[in-house]
Amino acid sequence: MSRFALVGCTAVAVIVSTVMALGNQPHARPLDALGHVLLAGGAIGLAWLKDRPVVSVAVCGAAAAAVFALGYAYALWAVPPLMAVFAAIAADDRRAGWAGAGLLVAVPAAGVALDPELGNLAVLLVWTLVVVLVAQLGEASRARRGYIAELERTREEEARRRARDERLKIARELHDVTSHTVSLIALQAAVAAEAVDRAGGPAEARAALGVIRSASREAMAEMKGLLGVLREGSEHRAPMPGLDGLRELAATAGVPVSVEVSGERRPLSPAVELTAYRVVQEALTNIARHARAAAATVTLRFERGGVVVEVTDDGHGVGGGSPAGHGLVGMAERVAAVGGTLSTGDRPEGGFGVAAWLPA
């Protein structure tokens, strides 16, 4: 129920019930303009019931105390302050809630003290029990909410613990198996390069072994960063690669690669930086594996609202039978994840091209 509907329905209920109660309470004060204002004010206090229950306690309690003190007929005008007391205590505003409960009991108690008849004492006792019952219901609701919140926190902590354990397990596997294998590749590449040098082997072999060694070292560096993320240790966490590492990446491509940058360079978000780097990395990997290219070009062009990352080669392209599209699906998904677009295909002048537009 919206707050407007709650206030409107309550106002109608308390006014109508008070008018009807006058027939059974002949000694009560007739409902005049002031009475209507007080009854409506008590109902209006419910407008803050959810977001500011303390205000509701103050407004509804004051209106009910005034109605009682002025001698209007007993009716449903006592309900709004009870609702406010319950809401305040349930929302953990216990001091305001119990203060309101005390006010609801103290005002009629003062009236009974002036006229201590047995009937009045009995009514006061019943009313006090009602107020205490409502306040205790608020306490039960508050305790239940606290229990549920604690249960949710326990579940979240358990889920985080399980995720942390799983990350540590993956990190151990990466460190014990994959990291060892990549280190071995780098070591053997270095040994092989020295052997080629001693034997006076071809320059192409030395260059290829150098690329393998550099790529292995780069893979080890990135793997260390990934292990730091998995272990949640900031002291082990290496920065993610970005555009500053494009020239180093191009040097390990296995083919001559030129890097061109145009436009006014500006800072990019870490996600866009990493995506641009991965696009170039995947494209150069495809070129080295499949394109049979003699050279490649990486172009980074800053435009209004975005940056274009383009990688082209002079190889055979897909039309020449090269499966240059390997890894392009993952590349497209990565680009789309940051709100960019990717286009790939054979170039009219020959070779294959990859172009990604990334928001910046």
Image (cartoon, grey):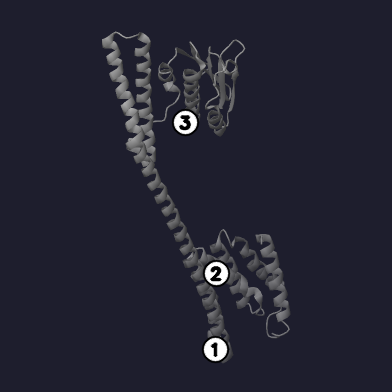
Looking at the image, tell me whether mark 2 or mark 1 is earlier in sequence order: 2
| Residue 32 pos. (x, y %) | 72, 74
Looking at the image, tell me whether mark 2 or mark 3 is earlier in sequence order: 2
Of 127 and 148, which appears nearest the observer? 148
Of 10 and 284, which appears nearest the observer? 284
Q: Quadrant of residue 130?
A: bottom right
Say which amino acid is labelled 2.
Answer: Phe
Q: Residue at x 63, y 68 (%)?
A: 42
The answer to whether residue 240 of the structure is visible from this angle is yes
Disc 1, SS: loop
Say which amino acid is labelled 3.
Answer: Pro
Looking at the image, tell me whether mark 1 or mark 3 is earlier in sequence order: 1
Q: Which residue is mark 3?
A: 270
Labelled disc at residue 86:
2
Q: Residue at x 58, y 90 (%)?
A: 119
Q: Is the C-beta separation of discs 1 and 3 under 8 Å?
A: no
Say which amino acid is labelled 1.
Answer: Pro
Q: Is the C-beta separation of discs 2 and 3 under 8 Å?
A: no
| Residue 172 pos. (x, y %) | 34, 40
Q: How many marks overall? A: 3
The answer to whether residue 31 of the structure is visible from this angle is no
- Quarter holding the C terminus is top right
Real-space CA distance between mark 1 and mark 3, rounded to the nearest whole angstrom: 77 Å
- Quarter holding the N terminus is bottom right
Q: Which residue is mark 1?
A: 116
Real-space CA distance between mark 2 and mark 1, rounded to the nearest whole angstrom: 29 Å
Q: Residue furthest bottom?
A: 118
Disc 2, SS: helix
Q: Is residue 329 above or below residue 293?
A: below
Of the residues tagged 2 and 3, which is closer to the observer?
3
Q: Residue at x 53, y 77 (%)?
A: 133
Of 39 and 258, which appears nearest the observer? 258
